[in-house]
Image (tube, helix red, strand yellow):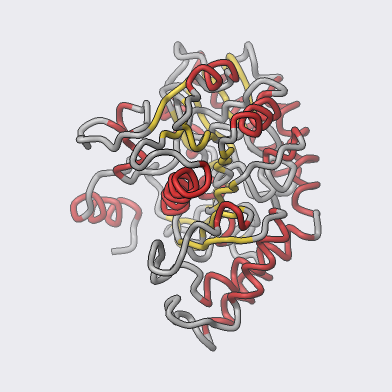
Amino acid sequence: MTTTAELIELSERRSAHNYHPLPIVIREAQGAWVTDVEGRRFLDCLSGYSALNFGHGNAKIIEAAREQLDRLTLTSRAFFHDQFAAFAAGLGDLTGKDMVLPMNTGAEAVETAIKTARKWGYEVKGVARDRANIIVMEDNFHGRTTTIVSFSTDPDAHGGYGPYTPGFKIVKYGSVEAIREAIDADTVAVLLEPIQGEAGVLVPPDGYLRQVRELCTEQNVLMIADEIQSGLGRTGETFACDHEGVVPDVYVLGKALGGGVVPVSAIAANADVLGVIRPGQHGSTFGGNPLACAVACAVIDLLNTGEYQARSKQLGAVLHERLNTLVGRGAVAVRGRGLWAGVDIDPSIGSGREISEALMRRGVLAKDTHGSTIRLAPPIVIAEEDLLWAVDQLADALGDLSR
């Protein structure tokens, strides 16, 4: 079976339908471009939901992975290995934190942050046993475990998975007053995305993150920033929190930390927070494995140059300037920061899915969310001319569908 139609038919017949992929079967990729099984090339403007910030097949990341594959891939955390210290120190330095706790997927990192916050609440803050609560935001997306979907407001992510985990208060995103009103003596953390990706690349009001930081400090509550999609260069800074000069108590990282090669995630915090986790209380067989650490160290080295953050900022300005010219020409709003944008399409023209399919026919890969919104998040290595070409294809698609 080699054709797109044959491979899709078999995939749909033999796998659960928990995704609705665009009808393309990718065979290989390099940089910002992918090639399907029939030799057609497409510009990737999704980057694996920001997992491929440094592009497909980044030479430095692939070299690190290949070298490590030949030596050692797994020990479990029952033993130390020679890549772990460099990873822990490197990520700690990048975040400015004392300690890191590695896991694999983003959802695992969020779960780790939740467990750490609760344990900190009981052992450090003095919250009574089993009384801790965490404040979370409407329209959040932090993963798909049963605990995480318990506080999701997305009907698709939430519905049908009860009974739900208690201990969360949901408030309006972007409202510091809503958080202030929700905080009580048992609140141990505020968990938020500095920019809400799945919700449509929603950027909070200016000053919001800074005010949340000040409120958390005032109330002795941990500020947990889920930077899984927004971090590691995507928005033009190392972390989206950097735009307001904010340092959370806990960073939650994933996706691009694995360089598009292996799943790598982690939380980073100071010793007074992460020190509450002791041997046997949390872990993962694959978390912090040698291959993951080698790849993550290569990613950290790339970020330490500052090149990718600067490029994301520069190209992001180009992207948003060009996208804003589409408002009133099929688009009704554009949001985002750096090389990350949410574009709301006029529903009378078509759904986000229809626009994504129209873009695919023009050689551009993007993905819809929440009805008539599409997300654009190309690899940071994308050439400026390719970026402008992608927006031109969006303009053409909107024009064709509005006729």
Describe residue 388's horizontal placement relative to residue 181 as left or right: right
- Residue 241 image point, x, y percent: 68, 38
Q: Residue 10 or 252: which is nearer the viewer?
A: 252
Q: Residue 40 or 247: which is nearer the viewer?
A: 247
Residue 82 seen in the figure: yes
Q: Residue furthest bottom?
A: 71
Describe residue 147's horizontal placement relative to residue 383 as left or right: left
Q: Residue 327 or 123: which is nearer the viewer?
A: 123
The residue located at (57%, 19%) in the rendering is 399
The residue located at (33%, 46%) in the rendering is 145
Q: Residue 400 or 159: which is nearer the viewer?
A: 159
Describe residue 378's horizontal placement relative to residue 350 as left or right: right
Above or below, 395 against 339 in this view is above
Above or below, 162 against 94 in this view is above
Residue 33 seen in the figure: no
The residue located at (47%, 53%) in the rendering is 109
Above or below, 204 against 115 in this view is above
Numbered disc total: 0
Above or below, 143 against 34 in this view is above
The residue located at (63%, 75%) in the rendering is 85
The quarter in which the N terminus is drawn is: bottom left
- Residue 277 image point, x, y percent: 47, 60
- Residue 345 image point, x, y percent: 52, 19
